[in-house]
Amino acid sequence: MNNLILKMYVKGQTLWSTLKDDEGQDLVEYALVVALIALAATVGMKALAGGINNAFGNISNHLGTYTS
């Protein structure tokens, strides 16, 4: 009987230490942060590209007007 209780205690301690182990959690957190940064950079680049495209379009229109 004592042997069974001791085995259950050891298994419980092993399970508890496994649940408290958070080494893998750091990797998931870093992956989420990298994904968020990549998403923000993509959205920012699209907005910047649109603004640059409009600026060059305006320059092209003005140069076309002044040269003809």
Image (cartoon, grey):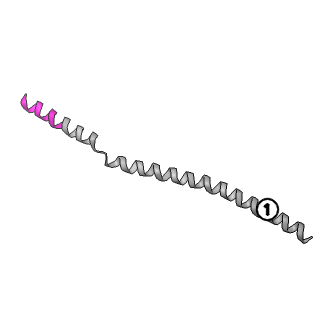
In magenta segment, residue 8: yes
- Using the image as rendered, state which of residue 28 and residue 60 is in the foreground: 60
Quarter of the figure with the N terminus: top left
Q: Residue furthest right?
A: 68
Using residue 66 as the reference point, say whether residue 21 is left or right of it. left
**Above or below 59: residue 40:** above
Query: For this view, does 12 lie left or right of residue 2?
Result: right
Secondary structure mostly taken by the magenta-highlighted segment of the chain: helix
Residue that carries the numbered disc 1 in the rendered image: 57
For the point 75% across and 58% down, the residue is 54
Residue at 59% across, 54% down: 42
Q: Secondary structure at mark 1?
A: helix
Quadrant housing the C terminus: bottom right
The front one of 64 and 9 is: 64
Tell me which segment is drawn in magenta.
Answer: 1-11
Residue closest to the far top: 1
Q: Nearer the viewer, residue 40 or 63?
A: 63
Q: Position of residue 63 (x, y in %)?
A: 84, 68
Q: Position of residue 2 (x, y in %)?
A: 7, 30
Residue at screen point 11% across, 34% down: 6
Q: Residue at x 61, y 52 (%)?
A: 43
3 inside magenta stretch: yes
